[in-house]
Amino acid sequence: MWIQLLIAGIIILIVLVILGLFISIYNRFKTLLNGADAGLAQIKVALKKRLDMITQLVDTAKGYAEFEKGTMTEVTKMRSRVGQIKGAGEVSKLGNQSRKILDNIIAVVENYPELRSQENVKELMNAIQDVEGEIARHRYTYNNIIQEFNTKVDVVPSNVVAGLFHFEKLEYLEFDESEISKRPDTTW
């Protein structure tokens, strides 16, 4: 009789340990998903800041250089899309597009020494450099979260939980090679 109770107790203990492990793994997946969502939201805020600064830079430089009307239209469209984008691919695409516009505007500003020397332009360029660093930090954090999530989807025993709850690998934020190698130079 006591042997049967001991066996039943051991079985209950094993089931509780497995259930605890299962719950722990599930909670970690949910924590990582929430972290990824928060990271993406932070990147979207930083992209919106970048677009605001592009607008300010274009407004400041208008007297010195003719900018295509399309530049401001495109920046305005991008800014309105920031809140609507959902996935990492869309964030990457918008980030790369806004970075290309910023690079073009910086090239124009660099061609006008009197514009570069204006205090508000210097301040804007320093602020842009800060936002670029912020975007890079948020992307790094986001991709680290995604790496952990994707690893958990692949490895035992968390892959069992991933399969049961249909957790699938998530997309990394892709970096445009020109964005990695080039940051705005504000050391004029």
Image (cartoon, grey):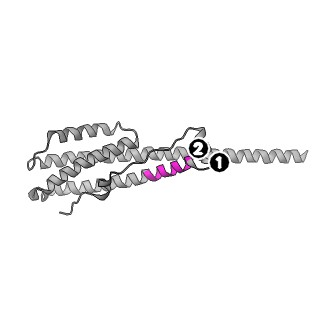
Judged left or right of residue 181, residue 28 is right
Residue 93 rendering spot, x and y as whole percentages: 33, 43
Q: Tell me the number on the disc at residue 21.
A: 1
Q: Say which residue appears at 43% left-offset and 48% top-offset.
A: 172
Residue 44 makes an appearance in the image: no
Residue 129 rendering spot, x and y as whole percentages: 26, 56
Q: Quadrant of the N terminus?
A: top right
Judged left or right of residue 7, residue 106 is left
Residue 115 picture quarter: bottom left
Q: Indicate yes or no whether the magenta region holds residue 171.
A: no
Residue 162 makes an appearance in the image: yes
Residue that numbered label 2 is attached to: 26
**Circle 2 Cα neighbour tier, 10 Å, few/some/many (<14 / 14–19 / ≥20):** some
Q: Amino acid at mark 2?
A: Tyr
Q: Quadrant of the C terminus?
A: bottom left
Q: Say which residue appears at 53% left-offset and 43% top-offset.
A: 30
Magenta part of the chain: 143-153
Q: Amino acid at mark 1?
A: Leu
Q: Indicate yes or no whether the magenta region holds residue 144.
A: yes
Residue 149 rendering spot, x and y as whole percentages: 51, 48
Per the image, label 2 sits on a secondary structure element best described as helix
Per the image, label 1 sits on a secondary structure element best described as helix
Residue 69 rendering spot, x and y as whole percentages: 14, 39
Q: Say which residue appears at 58% left-offset and 42% top-offset.
A: 162
Distance between the alpha carbons at the discs numbered 1 and 2:
9 Å
Judged left or right of residue 51, residue 165 is right
Q: Main secondary structure of the magenta part?
A: helix
Q: Are marks 1 and 2 in contact (CB under 8 Å)?
A: no
Q: Say which residue appears at 47% left-offset and 49% top-offset.
A: 146
Residue 168 or residue 130, whichever sits in front? 168
